[in-house]
Image: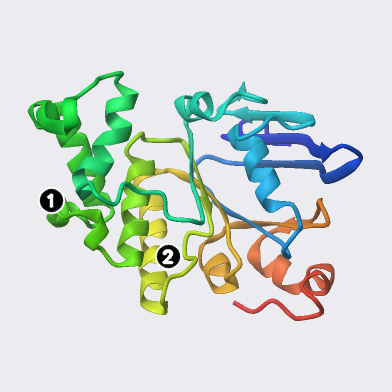
Amino acid sequence: MNEDAVLRVENLGHSYGRFKVIEDISLAIGKGETSALIGPNGAGKTTFYNAISGRFPPTRGKVYLNGEEITGLPSHRVVARGMCRSFQITNVFAELTVAENVFTPLIIQQNKHFKLYGNVYRDKLIVDKAMHTLEQVGFADRADQTVSSLAYGDKRLVEMAIVLAREPSVVLLDEPTAGMNPEETENMISLIKKLAKVSGTTFFITEHDMKVVFSLAEKIYVLHQGHLLAQGRPEEIRANEDVQEAYLGRKVHA
């Protein structure tokens, strides 16, 4: 196990009574890597994400972020330590502007309170940081647009900006291209590649679209029936017969 990994999970397990949802999962992800967690429906991916991100404490095992144990910490404390998560269902403030959505995590991060966002525009640090984040996702010129008026794929980009605003060391992306059309999917793939290269952010994604997985991931972890079935580089996973069988006998195509 890589002791220098930015995210390290050791023998993680979670049960509901006697039912073991995930069991004995260990992995280590290096700084700046983009990795993927895949598996059939019911394999335990969501439970694993919830257990490492603080949605609930795991039954067994340990989680380390930047060398510091975070096992069982609640979500807000995990975020404060440097791991943020986006969800499959878009999680944005529809009636606020794009900029105001990005202001929100920055206000919380700095323990500031602004009445209806009115005087936040006077805080140069927050405004500059928000605009820099929007530039990263290509949305600086739409900062004043109300989020409810955006197309679905654009709302996902705003959600990405919200996550990135806190400058996390690790970003968990849960189905980042779910519901997107092919053009939106390609835009998201390109954005994640660019962000990983420019910012050095570590991305850990779970995704059903194998084209997305093989386009992005440097290393792939495969869950099946709660256990880690395989791990390796994309070409190793693509050729793995056990992985192919886990996907109902179908070969995994890029």
- Label 1 neighbour load within 10 Å: few <14, some 14-19, many 20+: few
Q: Is residue 26 left or right of residue 166?
A: right
- Residue 74 appears left or right of 2: left
Identify which residue is drawn at 72% across, 63% down: 41
Which of disc 2 and disc 1 is earlier in sequence? 1
Q: In this view of the protein, which residue sits in the foreground, 254 or 157?
A: 157
In percent of the image, x 78 and y 30: which residue is there? 61
Percent position of residue 124, x then y = 11, 28
Amino acid type, label 1: Asp
Q: Residue 155's spot in the image, x, y percent?
A: 33, 58
Above or below — where is 28 with respect to 71? Answer: below
Quickly name the residue at label 1: 144
Question: Residue 163 appears in which quarter of the rendering?
Answer: top left
Task: Give x and y (percent) for residue 159.
Answer: 36, 50
Q: Indicate the position of residue 27 as horizontal and vertical percent values.
A: 71, 42
The relative height of residue 54 versus residue 113 in the rendered view (above or below) is below
The CA span between labels 1 and 2 is: 25 Å
Provide the residue designation for mark 2.
189
Circles 1, 2 touching at the beta carbon (< 8 Å): no
Q: Is 75 drawn above or below residue 196 in the view shown?
A: above
Question: Does dot 2 land on a helix, a strand or a loop?
Answer: helix
Q: Nearer the viewer, mark 1 or mark 2?
A: 1
Q: Quadrant of the N terminus?
A: top right
Pick the front one: 49 or 31: 49
Compare residues 77 and 93 and report the one nearer the observer. 93
Residue displayed at 19% across by 24% down: 114
